[in-house]
Image (cartoon, grey):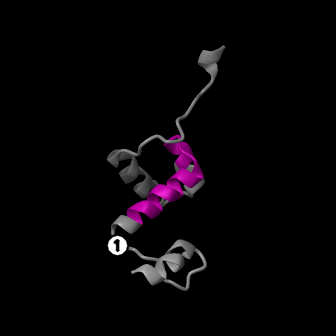
Amino acid sequence: MIDDIKITNPRHTWTKEEIEKVEKLIKKHTAREAGEMINRSKNAVLGVLYREKVKRGYEPPLDSKYARIRKYKKGFG
């Protein structure tokens, strides 16, 4: 039946409680394990942790191979 299918919304907004919980879980578990515990994907967990890190002032170094977007904006700021 359709009621047996578990549907998760990929654009589900993170609550403050969920973010706090995943920040505690990630200290003792992998991102995959933490995600399973709160019914989120590994990438969702990693993404929210990174966004929180950026909110707290983190900026990747310009020579980082993962900072391509910032390299393009380098001449605009």
> Over which residues does the magenta segment extend?
35-53
Q: Amino acid at mark 1?
A: Gly
Rendered residue at 33%/68% (across/down)? 56
45 is within the stretch colored magenta: yes
Rendered residue at 58%/52% (across/down)? 42
Quadrant (top left, top right, bottom left, bottom right) of the C terminus = bottom left
In this view, which residue lies farthest toward the bottom?
A: 63
Alpha-carbon neighbours of circle 1 within 10 Å: few (<14), some, or many (≥20)? few
Quadrant (top left, top right, bottom left, bottom right) of the N terminus = top right
Looking at the image, residue 17 lies above or below residue 61:
above
Coordinates of residue 51 in the picture (x, y in percent): 43, 61
In this view, which residue lies farthest toward the front?
A: 76
Q: Which quadrant of the view contains residue 15?
A: top left
Depth check: 22 or 67 in front?
67
Q: Which residue is mark 1?
A: 57
Depth check: 51 or 77 in front?
77
